[in-house]
Amino acid sequence: MEEKNTNDANKNAEKIQALRDMISTAETTLQGAKSMLLQLEGKKKAGRRRKTEDADENEKVIEGTFDGQIMLGTDGKQYPVPANYASKSKLVKGDMMKLSITSDGSFIYKQIGPVVRKMAIGTVNQDTDGNYFVVADGKAYRVLLASITYFKVEPGDEVTLVTPRDIDSEWGAIENLLQKSREKKELPRKDADQDIGGFRKIDGIFNEKPARDETAAPAAPAPEKEVASTSDNTSVIDEWMPNLDELRKELENKSQE
């Protein structure tokens, strides 16, 4: 009985090994088929790049904190952050950043630890030196000029401002434009007569409006034209008779000559 059990165990082990061999062969065949398919489709075999190809051996990595304009590195140095990148990424004071300096001198920034933010609605203003700021929640926040030009905002416009929630900051980032300050005025009807500036609009056409002299006396009314009355005793034909007689005499004198 014990010998029979041993034989059964050996047979099961052989079956298990045979199944493993079949699976391994099938996987190898499947990988080969995939490789051939990629070659026929003109695609390269996907794979992980080597470490020497993926990273620059001379690359220098520095971490730091964004202060609203620049990055304060952990090495105690200050690094300029491109205004366009800071504006589009909506960076705020306290955001953790990583700076990679490649062997050719290129600066590559990446945000690695954003701080908790809060939103507020504010109004854009501009000081005498041309610097822009946004007044929100009773406080003035400086904003990057790149944000002003990107969203095309002007003084008086309402914007959504992003600021750090738990950090006191004089800088903020514009999230979006809400409303322009210029109000749209209702256009006049084309068939209306209106005075606009120094012109008068009549039937949809602007004509120069004559200047008005407030000190001049009002113009006298134009005299009424006299109209000949056909009910008078002397008719129009009788008035022309002397002229006709003179013409007749003149013609007779010329005929006698």
Image (cartoon, rainbow, N blue to C red):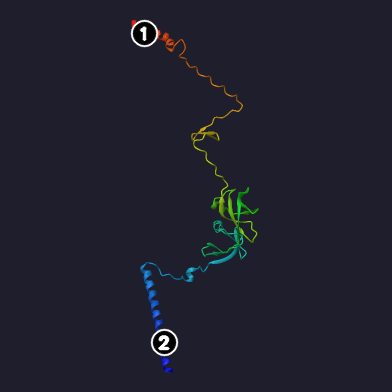
Residue 193 % position (x, y): 52, 34
Q: In which quarter of the image is the N terminus?
A: bottom left
Q: Residue furthest top?
A: 256
Q: Is residue 257 visible?
A: no
Residue 211 is drawn in which quadrant?
top right
Neighbor class of circle 2 (other Cα within 10 Å; few <14, some 14-19, many 20+) is few
Q: Which amino acid does label 1 sit on?
A: Leu
Viewer-nearest of labels 2 and 1?
2
Residue 64 % position (x, y): 60, 64
Residue 210 % position (x, y): 54, 30
Using the image as rendered, state which of residue 138 and residue 50 is in the foreground: 138
Instruction: Residue 251: give its label.
Output: 1
Using the image as rendered, state which of residue 145 and residue 117 is in the foreground: 117
Using the image as rendered, state which of residue 224 and residue 82 is in the foreground: 224
Q: Is residue 62 visible?
A: yes
Instruction: Residue 60: give its label.
Output: none
> Could you tell me which residue is drawn at 36 percent across and 8 percent down?
251
Q: Is residue 171 left or right of residue 14?
A: right
Q: Is mark 2 on a helix, strand or loop?
A: helix
> Could you tell me which residue is drawn at 38 percent across and 8 percent down?
248
Neighbor class of circle 1 (other Cα within 10 Å; few <14, some 14-19, many 20+) is few
Going from N to C along the chain, the mark reached first, 2 or 1, is 2
Q: Which amino acid does label 2 sit on?
A: Asn
Q: What element carries label 1?
A: helix
Which residue is under mark 2? 12
Q: Quadrant of the C terminus?
A: top left
